[in-house]
Image (cartoon, helix red, strand yellow):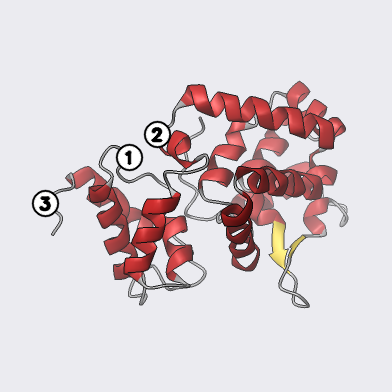
Amino acid sequence: EDAWIDKATIRQIDLDLDRTYTELGLFSGQGPYQQPLRDVLLAYSCFRPSVGYVQGMGYIASTLLLYMEPETVFVCMGNLLHKHHFPDFLLVDMEQIDLYAAAFTQVFAKELPALQKHLATTGVDCRLYIVEWWMTVFCTVLPLSASSLVWDLLVMEGISAIVRITIGILAVLQPVLLGASLEKCLTVLTHAEDWFDVSPQDGGAVLHEDEAGENGATGEEEADGGQKKARESKSFAAV
């Protein structure tokens, strides 16, 4: 069944299965959705060999599997991943990614000028976080209840919704990032999921108060805490 895919791709897919939504227990080990997820990822790799399998696809497929049958997930991935920003990001087309980054930076500077200036001065390139955030539609950043809503916005509004959500996340993180060192900024932005939690009242994403610096912890202590809680699925290479 795997003859059409090279062994390296199969190996990478199998490794990433155990790193996808580990907290749910549905896609790893003996989870009921592990085989359907594997089947969808293998099928897409055969369907579009010019793209193959790219880390991050597992989050897209697994999110869709929570709402539909595997066959429908495959169709949705085939339709969605050739639209919007996905082709350029999946193929790591740096020329196009640079254009997206430049356009985003203009919006960032308009909406959050102080934070944009600080990150630029500190040396933080927005590509270090938007590549992962956008390619997984924030599945590695926001709680599932919130990232599922982002999918609705993407389908209805396109890339503009992705930009708005990115600005929203940065606005929430702004108290932590403003004045922070390069190391601290990189820790927060590349492990942003560690700074959000699910509110028991409404299931929404909220910023941890202690990680916002309100408990008197030092920046170094907060950064260490974030690193300890980092998901095993963090395997994206910096672009």
What residue is at 63 percent from the left and 51 percent from the top? 157
User: Nearer the observer, disc 3 or disc 1?
Assistant: 1
Three-letter residue code for mark 2 = Leu
Instruction: Return the residue at label 2.
Output: 91
Spot occupied by residue 72 in the image (x, y as percentages of width and height): 37, 67
Instruction: Return the residue at label 3.
Output: 3
What residue is at 73 percent from the left and 68 percent from the top? 204
Alpha-carbon span between mark 2 and mark 1: 6 Å
Q: Earlier in the sequence, mark 2 or mark 1?
A: 1
Three-letter residue code for mark 3 = Ala
Alpha-carbon span between mark 3 and mark 1: 17 Å
Q: Callout 1: 10 Å neighbours few (<14), some, many (20+)?
A: some
- Disc assigned to residue 51: 1
User: Is residue 140 among the parts visible in the rendering?
Assistant: yes
Alpha-carbon span between mark 2 and mark 3: 23 Å
- Is label 3 in contact with label 1 (beta carbons under 8 Å)? no
Q: Earlier in the sequence, mark 2 or mark 3?
A: 3
